Image (cartoon, rainbow, N blue to C red):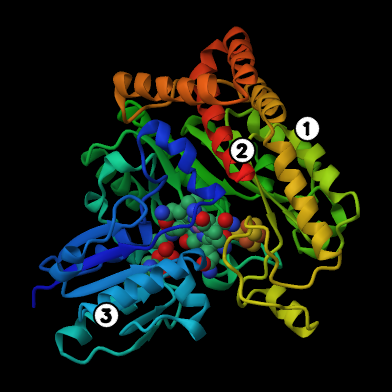
Amino acid sequence: MAMKILLVYPEFPDTYWSFRHALSFEGKRSAFPPLGLLTISAMMPDAWERRLVDLNVQPLKPADIEWADVVFASAMIVQKKSLRRVVDLSKAHGKRVVIGGPYVTTSAGHLPQADHIFLGEAEMTLPEFVCDLERGEPKRIYQAAERPALSATPIPDFQLVDLRRYSAMSVQYSRGCPFQCEFCDIIEIYGRVPRTKSNEQIVAELDALLRIGWRGMVFIVDDNFIGNKRNVKRLLPVLADWSERHDHPFSFITEASVNLAEDEELLEGMRRARFRHVFLGIETPVEASLKEAQKGQNLRRNLLDSVRRIQSYGMEVMAGFIVGFDNDPDEIFERQIEFIRESAIPLAMVGLLTALPDTQLWRRLEREGRLLVESTGNNTDGTLNFVPKMDATRLIEGYKSIMRTIYSPGEYYQRALNCLDRVVAGEPAPSQRGLIGDVVTLSRIVLALGVRDRARGEFWRYLRRAHAQYREKFAEAVRLAAVGYHFRKLTED
Ligand code: B12
Ligand code: SF4
């Protein structure tokens, strides 16, 4: 039976992660495409016609819904309002609606009225649903019995994506993480035994991206890219050789645990394969808080040394920081600011500790009677969903003071310069947009930051220093200025 399938990705609120103010310079609408939907699309029968509407790059038109037989939607908690609107609208058009993804998996209690609900990863359950639907007996709930081997994951349907709208493409190598951080929902959703794809699968995905014409940044969206060190050490040389053979069409960005800094082979492998950015979960420089968070992997070496070591392999370090641990001392805000300054991490994602559903933290706070409400899913919106040890008003004020300080123009530009100083230059990063596109982007940035912005004096001083001292990294310097502008705008808002 041929079916028309509409895949809908709900809208994100405007957060630090949306990169909205920086993306507009590039003429892009969103940073990354919705890989979960592209992946489930590839599990559907070839005869089913598929379309993607990502609300972060285009509106959902009534005609799109009218066209479809079935609407599939995926969401994180932070997209729950928009998901509800998508479901209601599709139901109002009389459509069958299927939902899944991390929000649906972790919050089964209060979901919108969809016809079919997928809990967990869909590699085994979606084919079952397809059969049930074709037999006319689809179930309401599909619960993955176990976490599937990623050999069952098909090449995502990248061709559904309008490449012009995104600043990077995504691939996934592994799911899960071996660590046990108390606040983390990754290990609850995807497990503590990292499962990886084969080298052949990854190469086939990169080939697919190349075939549809992508050039530029590729985000390896793993929870912890080095979760399975043995396998990743086998992948990295393959990745480097593939890049070499294809004249380096991509540079890579990923997420990893801090113990990356301990492993020379991994660092060298990532440098060769052209990893340019890595996001680390640093969380806090306070030892007692790291212990409380069960983040032993961050206690093994000096954290500042670890960051410096990774930067010396040509990777800009981005990192997550958290305030609100029970063990945070009174001077936590100054200590976080100091650490971020000294580590030369331009993009520091600082958040308030959040109890996500069904995490170890959630369970502890529930036992202690400290849970307040379900999380908004956005740990940077200045709200708390539990009773902290520190006075709540003080905590929120302190959090805001960190953001105001680290994204003030002087502080940010200095950090960006320090980062340029430490990150050893690699070959120029490939660009999807070509020279003319790059010139247009540069003019937009100069107009916004160098003419209209009240901090234009600092911008020009920064550019002059970057040009004089780090000429070979000038494009990177401009990119950092643009992203810093996004963070400052949001902080001011
Ligand atoms: C890439 C990524 C992002 C990208 C988004 C890219 C995009 N457009 O999708 C960026 C960097 C922007 C991002 C941001 C955020 N993210 Co994010 N992100 C991820 C990450 C690392 C990978 C997502 C991915 O592509 N996975 C690959 C696909 C294949 O996996 P999947 O989505 O789970 O899909 C499988 C199943 O779930 C299922 N499925 C999924 N959808 C559907 C739908 C249907 C109908 C069906 C049948 C099945 C199904 O089938 C797939 C195959 O098995 C995940 C972690 C993870 N491992 O998934 C976190 C994750 C999704 N993010 C998370 C969070 C919290 C955020 C932020 C709120 C962070 C913050 N603190 O502010 C922000 C919010 C964004 C915003 N603007 O406000 C949480 C969500 C928690 C939750 N329970 O909702 C996760 C799980 C990680 C975490 N614990 O921190 N994120
Ligand atoms: S290292 Fe990151 S992904 Fe792994 S358990 Fe800790 S927070 Fe979760």
Q: In the visual, does 328 lie left or right of 425? A: right
Q: In the visual, does 168 lie left or right of 403? A: left
SS class of the residue under badge 3?
helix
**Residue type at the position of mark 3:** Lys
Residue 137 locus on image (x, y percent): 21, 92
Query: In the image, what residue occupies the spot 32% across and 25% down?
Result: 247
Front one among 86 and 309: 86
Q: Which corner quadrant of the image does residue 163 belong to?
A: top left
Q: What mark, if any, has residue 488 been given in the picture?
A: 2
Label 3 or label 1, whichever comes before in sequence order: 3
SS class of the residue under badge 1?
helix
Query: In the image, what residue occupies the spot 37% across and 62% down?
Result: 36
Q: Which corner quadrant of the image does residue 441 belong to?
A: top left
Q: What mark, if any, has residue 147 been given in the picture?
A: none
**Residue type at the position of mark 2:** Arg
Residue 487 locus on image (x, y percent): 59, 40
Residue 195 visible in the current orientation = no
Residue 274 visible in the current orientation = yes
Q: Is the residue marked by circle 3 packed among few (<14), some (14-19), or many (20+) residues within 10 Å? A: some
Residue 336 locus on image (x, y percent): 79, 44
Residue 390 locus on image (x, y percent): 86, 64
Query: In the image, what residue occupies the spot 64% across and 34% down?
Result: 346
Residue on which disc 1 sits:
342
Marks 2 and 3, Cα distance to the nearest angstrom?
40 Å
Front one among 490 and 9: 490
Q: Is the residue marked by circle 2 packed among few (<14), some (14-19), or many (20+) residues within 10 Å? A: many
Front one among 186 and 450: 450
Marks 3 and 1, Cα distance to the nearest angstrom?
53 Å
Residue on which disc 3 sits:
91
**Residue type at the position of mark 1:** Glu
